């Protein structure tokens, strides 16, 4: 049964409209529709979640440059412009290197944590990436190891930016 109530659907729809309001009109409806669809899907998959957070971000300097797993229920992303999120399977990760490489620049920590660059899955433009976090119901072990893609810099500034829709599920307000 669908546990998302009618009022919750209306609230999610209103939030999707608010979060996309600043986008150009020709693009706004498509992103709002994506946000509504992904939100509904996540709420059906994890109906006990307490918090749904929506973001439309233009990202230059990436906050998630380091390989990591998230301590929340899950996230779904769509990258509309620029490279998509990088993800790897558990077998490709050297977990002992997470603590060992804290404070290292990414060009040193990346190959120690994920030694084989060719195993990295790169989410395609306009593709939906579902990232299960440590709190995903019934998950065994870890959440998906992922990071923002490496973006080239010139004169201390990113050469390109990414336009990203993020829909997060958690049990706490962030």
Image (cartoon, rainbow, N blue to C red):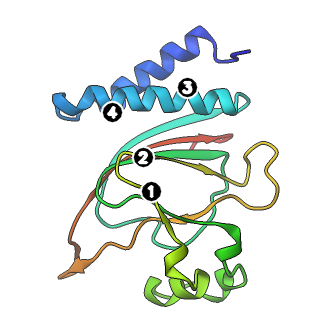
Above or below residue 131? Residue 160 is: below
Please state if 121 lies on the left or on the right of 60 as rendered. Answer: right
Q: Which residue is mark 4?
A: 31
Q: Are marks 3 and 2 in contact (CB under 8 Å)?
A: no
Residue depicted at 65% across the width and 42% down the height: 172
Q: Are marks 2 and 1 in contact (CB under 8 Å)?
A: yes
Q: Which residue is mark 3?
A: 40
Q: Which residue is mark 2?
A: 127
Mark 1 or mark 4, earlier in chain: 4
Q: Secondary structure at mark 4?
A: helix
Q: Secondary structure at mark 3?
A: helix
Q: Secondary structure at mark 2?
A: loop
Q: Which residue is mark 1?
A: 123
CA distance for labels 3 and 2: 17 Å
Q: How many marks?
A: 4
Please state if 51 lies on the left or on the right of 134 as rendered. Answer: left
Residue depicted at 25% across the width and 60% down the height: 161
């Amino acid at each position: 049964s669908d546990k998302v109530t009618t009022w919750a659907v209306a609230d999610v729809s209103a939030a999707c409209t608010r979060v996309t309001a600043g986008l150009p009109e020709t693009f706004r409806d498509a992103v709002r529709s994506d946000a509504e669809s992904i939100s509904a899907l996540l709420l059906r998959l994890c109906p006990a979640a307490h918090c749904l957070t929506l973001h439309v971000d233009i990202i230059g300097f990436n906050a998630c440059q380091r390989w990591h797993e998230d301590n929340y229920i899950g996230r779904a992303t769509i990258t509309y412009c620029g490279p998509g999120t990088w993800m790897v399977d558990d077998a490709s990760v050297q977990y002992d290197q997470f603590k060992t490489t804290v404070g290292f620049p990414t060009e040193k920590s990346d190959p120690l944590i994920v030694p084989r660059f060719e195993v990295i899955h790169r989410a395609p433009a306009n593709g939906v990436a579902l990232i299960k976090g440590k709190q995903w119901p019934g998950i065994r072990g870890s959440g998906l190891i992922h990071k923002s893609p490496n973006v080239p810099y010139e004169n201390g500034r990113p050469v390109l930016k990414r336009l990203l829709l993020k829909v997060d599920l958690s049990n706490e307000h962030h």
